[in-house]
Image (spheres, helix red, strand yellow):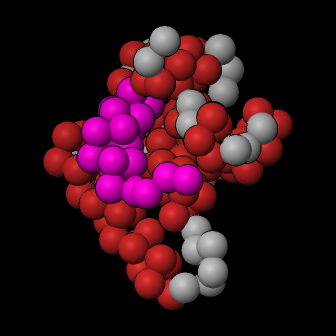
Amino acid sequence: MKRSETATKLFQNGCNCSQSVLEAFNDITGYSKEETRQMAAPFGGGYLGMGLPCGVVSGAFMVISRLTWPKDNNEKQKLYSKCLMNNFKSIFEEKNRSILCRDLLGKDISSTEQYNEAKDLDLFKKACPLFVQSAVEILETYIIPQIELN
């Protein structure tokens, strides 16, 4: 199964968007399912449903950070990680027009009224899986190939 399919299935089975993206890469990050779910839990819905950066972006940043974390505390590695995160952000925005949950959904889910509208429109089932898939595909296509994996 492709990672994007794995991530989408995780999302459809109850993981939030951030958990779904991060967990799809557990085989190369070395995280366990429990670690992934605990770390990424607060980032769903754009930081606990605040509509800020989409959880898929947070999940992708956690993947990038884990894979580029300096083994010898070399500052250059940290800058490299930041550059890859900026690349991810730019590509995600180009493909999806924004990195903000509220913009992607067209609803500010920090508002109870707009959250309910998003739910009534089935945006969490129709739109969010597409963003999960997009984030994973961007990581696999553009970002991870630039990282020297051990």
Residue at (59, 58) in percent of width and height = 66
The residue sitting at the left extreme is 94
Q: Would you say residue 46 is visible in this rendering? A: no
Residue 113: horizontal and vertical position, in percent?
52, 35
Q: Is residue 97 left or right of residue 66?
A: left
**Front residue of 68 and 21:** 68
Q: Does 78 sit above or below residue 91?
A: below
What residue is rendered at 39% in x and 73% in y?
A: 80
91 and 121: which is toward the camera: 91
Looking at the image, the residue that sits furthest to the front is 150
75 sits to left or right of 79: right
Which of the 4 image quadrants contains residue 111? top right
Residue 38: percent from left, percent from top: 79, 44
Residue 107 picture location, percent across and down: 39, 38
Q: Would you place residue 58 above or below residue 27 in this image?
A: below
Give 122 or 28, whichever is nearer the viewer.
28
In the image as oriented, which residue stretches furthest toward the bottom? 75
Residue beneath the point at 58% across and 68% down? 69
- Residue range highlighted in magenta: 131-150
